[in-house]
Amino acid sequence: MVCQGSFSRPTRSVSILLTAMVGCDGMSPTDHQSDRLANLLTARHLVALELANMALMLADPCAETSNSPFWVMEGNLEESVESCIKHSCALMLSTGVSWDVLASSREVSKQTLHRKYAHEADSAFESAQQYADMNIRDLRSELACLKVMAKHVVDELEAELAEAEAIWGDRRRQPGWWREGNPAHGWER
């Protein structure tokens, strides 16, 4: 349900993109800035919804995917959190927040934060522009998934928690329960 992917492409500085826009299609630099900012907001909202969907998957105690050791240990959650941070950095920088302010909010040095996120924020800004239409479609899809998953968690959590205790107890007693195809993994309902 969660859309994931990483894009690598040449990037330019966010500040250059936002301050050196030339209206080649009749749009003023302000119109370009507004469109670019809207694209970045959409991309940041998308990664936030992806993270919310992952969190709801963890709230389902019987879910196959989120309770797999492979899913948990592959770093899906950390990657999503990092993606939210880099998109948030790009958004803040695009609206005039300095690296100093961002660093002070994280209680790290400006140099440390810049070294870790400058390229990533530029990349997030560029991909938000390049994939604006796809991000809007994916945003709608993630929102639909979030609604379904939230309803499922709200409606089924108590019953699934009762069921989960038996499933996890069986898993504890079955070596290799996490292996796909193992009938003892308890994922079939």
Image: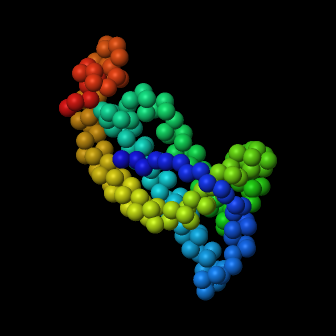
* Residue furthest bottom in the image: 26
Tell whether 91 sits left or right of 73. right
Residue 18 location, quadrant:
bottom right
User: In the image, is 72 to the left or to the right of 152?
Assistant: right
Residue 13 visible within the image: yes
> What coloring was used for the rendering?
rainbow
Residue farthest left in this picture: 189
Where is residue 102? Give x, y as percent. Answer: 71, 54
Residue 153 image position (x, y, % from top left):
31, 44
Q: Position of residue 76 (x, y in %)?
A: 49, 39
Residue drawn at (45%, 62%), measured in percent from left and top? 134
Question: What residue is at 61 percent from the left and 61 percent from the top?
Answer: 126
Can you see residue 41? Answer: no
Q: Position of residue 17 (x, y in %)?
A: 69, 68
Residue plotted at (32% across, 33% down): 64
**Residue at figure coordinates x 60%, y 80% from the top left:** 31
Q: How many numbered marks have been drawn onto this rendered protein structure? A: 0
Instruction: Identify which residue, 121 or 10, lies in the foreground.
Output: 10
Q: Quadrant of residue 138?
A: bottom left
User: Split into 4 quadrants, where in the image is the C terminus?
Assistant: top left
Q: Quadrant of residue 88?
A: bottom right
Q: Is residue 59 left or right of residue 77?
A: left
Q: Nearer the viewer, residue 149 or 87?
A: 87
In the rendered view, would you say 70 is above or below 60? above
